[in-house]
Amino acid sequence: MAQKKNEAVQAVEVKMIPTAEETNNEGLFVDTLWNQFEQSLERSRQLHETREDAYMNALREVIKFNKQYRKSLGNLFEQTKNTNKEVVSGVVQQINARREAFVKEEEMMGEKELLQQQFKEVSNQLENLALTPIKSAFQIIDQLEDNFEKSTEANIGFGREQLNAWQQVTNEYLKVARNTHNEIVNRGTNSFKELLKFTN
């Protein structure tokens, strides 16, 4: 009768010990948990980089638009300048035509040419004076935008370098945490197995 009892206890012990599949299921749960965490962390990093890239693209498009806008304003001023030259030229021709009709002496011709040159010089000086502040303002704005774009790029690059450095540290911590979690689960499983052996 003692032999039958021992055989029954051994049969119970065999049934109570978890199989390899149960241990794998526990390890699979831990791995799945950590894989999901790492995937969500990676998605978060990619989303952050995508937002930074979108910001830089939008910034570049705004700067490009502003440069085209200033260029069109510059062209408008050039057209105005050409129109002014044509008006001055027409006025000078009218003055010359009237002078020729009234005065045909040689002395007056020299004065007429001198007057034309002076008039052209004055109109050119006025045009240069009018365009100088506008050109200077456009140059300053271009420099500011270029500096802003460069500093933003440098800032994003620096931020990414820091994130990459921290990412390596974080990855190492995740590996250690995953291994520790697996060890805790395995120890718990082994302790539970040992407990079952002693209770039976």
Image: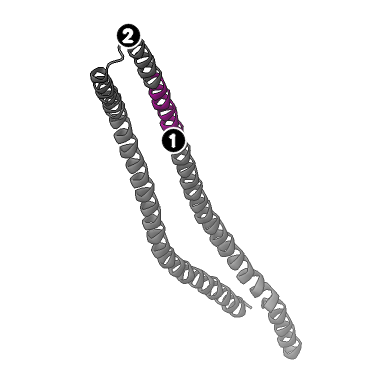
The answer to which quarter of the image holds residue 39 is bottom right
Q: What x and y, as percent, mark residue 187?
A: 53, 75
Q: Which residue is mark 1?
A: 71
Q: Earlier in the sequence, mark 1 or mark 2?
A: 1
Q: Please state, as top left, top right, bottom left or bottom right, where the N terminus lies in the image.
A: bottom right
Q: Gap in Å between the C-alphas at discs 1 and 2? A: 46 Å
Circle 1: residue type: Lys
Circle 2: residue type: Phe
Label 2 secondary element: helix
Q: Which residue occupies 33% across, 46% down?
A: 147
Task: Say if 98 sits above or below 87 in the image.
Answer: above
Label 1 secondary element: helix
The answer to which quarter of the image holds residue 84 is top left
Main SS of the magenta segment?
A: helix
Task: Say if 158 sits above or below 106 in the image.
Answer: below
Which mark's residue is nearer the viewer, 1 or 2? 2
Task: Say if 39 sits above or below 18 in the image.
Answer: above
Q: Nearer the viewer, residue 153 or 170?
A: 153
Q: Is residue 74 magenta?
A: yes
In the figure, is residue 172 to the left or right of 95?
Answer: right
Number of other residues with Cα within 10 Å of mark 1, as a class: few under 14, some 14 to 19, many 20 or more? few
Q: What x and y, as percent, mark residue 56?
A: 46, 47
Q: Is residue 19 visible?
A: no
Q: Please state, as top left, top right, bottom left or bottom right, where the C terminus lies in the image.
A: bottom right
Q: Which residue occupies 62% across, 69% down?
A: 26
The segment highlighted magenta reads: 69-87
The colour scheme used to paint the residues is one colour
Q: Which residue is mark 2?
A: 102
Q: Nearer the viewer, residue 68 or 39?
A: 68
